[in-house]
């Protein structure tokens, strides 16, 4: 005869333990945590404080006078106009004057370092007109536009310290590429190496070969 399966739900009358040994008294029958008992989320961070304070009347007047002046800032053989400074804003075509002035500041800083270290060779930077004249870029004569012309820039080397570019550490040349964006070519004179830095990722072989 087939025996019926044991009744697993049968309880002992003497305690609160069922037949499979599970103690109901030790089971957690409390309800789940209510939303009020949960840990509160941390408050959002405070907005950053402005580091600059509003200008007072005298400062505002001086600021207006500076923007209205022909030169916004001046330095050793270096100055910049308000118009060129405004070209540093996003969405504005960057003017060559702003590039020249920034690179000129690097040259001044490098010259100061060279004065402190005897073995430090100076560096120099040519203006963007160097490549424009070397390759006759933008020439009205279509027969010579884009052609190589060393005679246009053969006197430029006299601008370098000691009037000798081959004694420099680095020579930098900003280049206006197709009137669409800027790049810079750096000639590492002692390493006899030329490097083009272009955010567009172009090879710019034409410019590199032109200065060899």
Image (spheres, grey):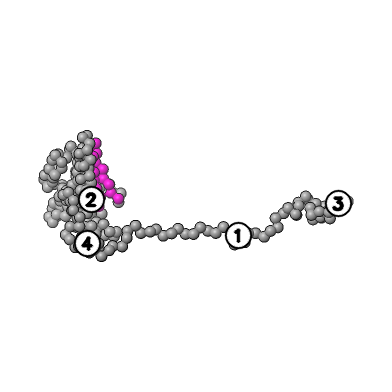
For marks 3 and 4, give the CA distance.
105 Å
| Residue 61 locus on image (x, y percent) | 22, 64
Crowd tier of the residue under label 3, counting other residues whose Cα lies within 10 Å: few below 14, some 14–19, many 20 or above = few
Question: Is label 2 or label 4 in front?
Answer: 4
**Whether residue 67 is visible:** no
Residue corresponding to mark 1: 37
| Residue 54 locus on image (x, y percent) | 31, 62
Part of the protein shown in magenta: 182-199
Residue corresponding to mark 3: 3
Mark 2 or 4, nearer chain start: 4
| Residue 66 locus on image (x, y percent) | 20, 60
Mark 3 or 4, nearer chain start: 3
Q: Residue at x 17, y 57 (%)?
A: 71
Residue corresponding to mark 2: 102
Which is more toward the observer, 144 or 65? 65
Q: Are marks 1 and 2 in contact (CB under 8 Å)?
A: no
Mark 1 or 2, nearer chain start: 1
Residue corresponding to mark 4: 62
Mark 4 or 1, nearer chain start: 1
Quick check: 51 left or right of 4? left
Which is more toward the observer, 147 or 49? 49
Mark 3 or 1, nearer chain start: 3
Q: Is residue 183 magenta?
A: yes
């Amino acid at each position: 005869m087939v025996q019926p399966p044991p009744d697993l739900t049968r309880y002992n009358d003497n305690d609160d333990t069922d037949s499979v040994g599970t103690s109901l008294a030790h089971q957690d029958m409390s309800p789940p945590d209510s939303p009020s008992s949960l840990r509160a989320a941390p408050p959002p961070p405070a907005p950053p404080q402005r580091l600059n304070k509003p200008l007072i009347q005298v400062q505002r007047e001086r600021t207006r006078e500076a923007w209205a002046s022909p030169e916004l800032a001046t330095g050793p053989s270096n100055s910049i106009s308000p118009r060129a400074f405004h070209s540093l804003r996003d969405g504005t075509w960057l003017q060559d004057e702003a590039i020249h002035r920034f690179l000129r500041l690097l040259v001044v800083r490098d010259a100061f370092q060279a004065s402190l270290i005897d073995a430090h060779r100076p560096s120099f930077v040519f203006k963007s007109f160097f490549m424009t004249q070397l390759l006759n870029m933008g020439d009205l004569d279509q027969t010579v536009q884009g052609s190589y012309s060393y005679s246009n820039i053969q006197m430029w080397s006299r601008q370098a310290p000691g009037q000798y570019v081959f004694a420099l550490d680095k020579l930098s040349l900003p280049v206006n590429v197709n009137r669409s964006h800027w790049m810079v070519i750096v000639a590492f004179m002692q390493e006899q190496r030329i490097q083009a830095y272009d955010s567009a990722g172009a090879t710019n072989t034409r410019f590199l070969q032109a200065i060899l």
